[in-house]
Image (tube, rainbow, N blue to C red):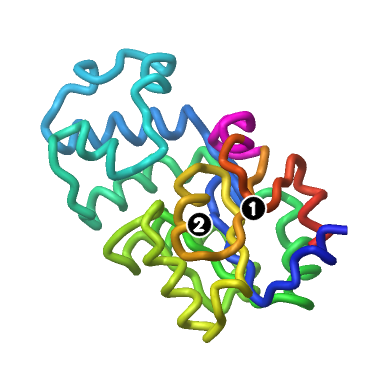
Amino acid sequence: MIAEQVKKKVIIFDFDGVLRSVSWKGLHVAYIEIIKAKGKDPKRFFTDLKTFRDWFDMDWHKNMENIDGTYLEKPEINALFHKHYDPHVKLFPWVEELLIHLSERYDLAILSSSSIHSVKEELGDVARFFPIIVGAETVMQLKPHPEGVHYILNHFGVLSENALIIGDTPQDFYAGESAGIWTGMIGWGLAPWGELQSLNAELYFEHPCELFLL
């Protein structure tokens, strides 16, 4: 069983794609509004959902740089994104049951590129399972930089070998790998499953039910 392989003290979850659904339509709408807010014409970058998916990069930094050549983590841009994106997504129905199960054995944390407000709003009462939630406004550098992982390890006072990150993008994998913790990739998120399998993470979860084996 996976639980016999992973004798860890802390599990760090990415949020969007792992515990909350993702929406290409929502991303498309949100980025149109961001580009308009930056005083540019969205049609300079993409013309429809298909061309948006070709343009889109899973790294928020790169998308912002592609829009106006610079990257600054501005709270108003993040708030604009969530205003238009969040109505298109929701918490997966199995999340509370999973967290009840895992919280008996592990400390749990969230490391997300979304805002803490967006994460907590979606979690509702389920947020009680997470002693720490690290969002975009918590750290100076988002994933794939390991700053957020180190922040969580320091909070719990655990060594890197006692932590596992579970994510749905290469950014999650590289953040975990750089911090020296275990990495786990899931198959129902944003990145293609084949791309994630090429990363050589320690654990793979093709279906949500496999998380219950931890």
Give the mark toward the camera: 1 or 2: 2
Residue positioned 54% across, 54% down in the render = 15
Residue positioned 59% across, 49% down in the render = 20
Q: In the picture shown, does residue 64 fall above or below 56?
A: below
Residues packed near mark 1 inside 10 Å, few (<14), some (14 to 19) or many (20 plus) = many
Question: Which mark is on residue 40?
Answer: none
Question: Which mark is on residue 184?
Answer: 1
Q: In the picture shown, does residue 116 fall above or below 131?
A: above
Residue positioned 13% across, 36% down in the render = 69
Amino acid under disc 1: Gly
**Residue 157, image x, y percentages:** 52, 86
Q: Residue under label 2, please give it.
A: 177
Q: Decide if residue 46 is on the left or right side of residue 213.
A: left
What quarter of the picture does the C terminus occupy?
bottom right
Quick one: which residue is furthest to the right in this view? 1
Q: What is the tally of numbered marks visible in this picture?
A: 2
Residue 120 seen in render: no
Point out the stretch of residues depicted in magenta. 188-197
